Amino acid sequence: DAKTTQPPSMDCAEGRAANLPCNHSTISGNEYVYWYRQIHSQGPQYIIHGLKNNETNEMASLIITEDRKSSTLILPHATLRDTAVYYCIVRVEHNQGGKLIFGQGTELSVKP
Amino acid sequence: DARVTQTPRHKVTEMGQEVTMRCQPILGHNTVFWYRQTMMQGLELLAYFRNRAPLDDSGMPKDRFSAEMPDATLATLKIQPSEPRDSAVYFCASSGPIANSPLHFGNGTRLTVT
């Protein structure tokens, strides 16, 4: 499984964009990049995923570099409730099981 | 919103006792995952099933842990006998049949073994 590298922690001011980086230099052509977050004492929450095109939904945007070796999750207007651990995961292709292997993630603190 | 439901939310038991954790996946989801989270190890995949058949249980200690899906609406994770080192939060997740369907997680069972 391709591994990911994320900074252990980041701060962001409330109302500003939070840009969370992730490196996945060994990603394979059929592997997707997924982002989850975990707010204290809750289960991980799905945010967004993509293969090679940039993706946007109501929660966030995902920017994947052309070589697919890194990506950035963007929370456009961070709020205090976005304080959480954010996980970037490269997912094994569905027909090979589709499991998610979590790393240590980035602890994002949104400050007033 | 459809949710994965886990019971119980909290369980305190003594070493040596059997523990059963239950999970109701989202209706229509055919893949069920069990994860364990501790401060030291983070989130670890224990086992997962597709269409009720085990796909991979290599992350699970086989001597004391067992995972089953008696039917499509119920997954169970049993520990017998339980040990203090099993204290953790156990999460169940499910995903749908479409390729690359995201996993949706329950809110976990917090297990404390004394």
Image (cartoon, coloured by chain):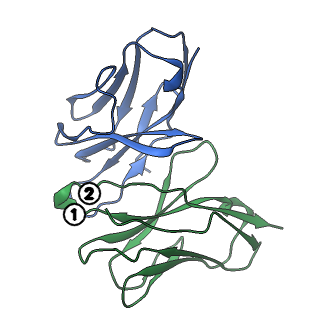
Tags 1 and 2 in contact by the CB under 8 Å rule?
yes
Depth check: B56 or A14 in front? B56
Residue B22 x, y percent position in the rendering: 38, 27
- Badge 2: chain ID: A
When asked about the image quadrant of residue A53, the answer is: bottom left
Q: Mark 1 packing: few (<14 Cα in 10 Å), some, or many (20+)?
A: few
Query: Residue sitting at 40 percent across and 65 percent down?
Result: A3
Which residue is the site of mark 1?
Answer: B99
Q: Is residue A60 visible?
A: yes
Q: Split into 4 quadrants, where in the image is the C terminus of chain A?
A: bottom right
Residue A1 x, y percent position in the rendering: 31, 62
Disc 1 vs disc 2: which is toward the camera? 2
Query: Residue sitting at 57 percent across and 41 percent down?
Result: B40
Q: Which chain is green?
A: A
Depth check: B14 or B11 in front? B14
What residue type is disc 2 on? Answer: Gly
Which residue is the site of mark 2?
Answer: A98
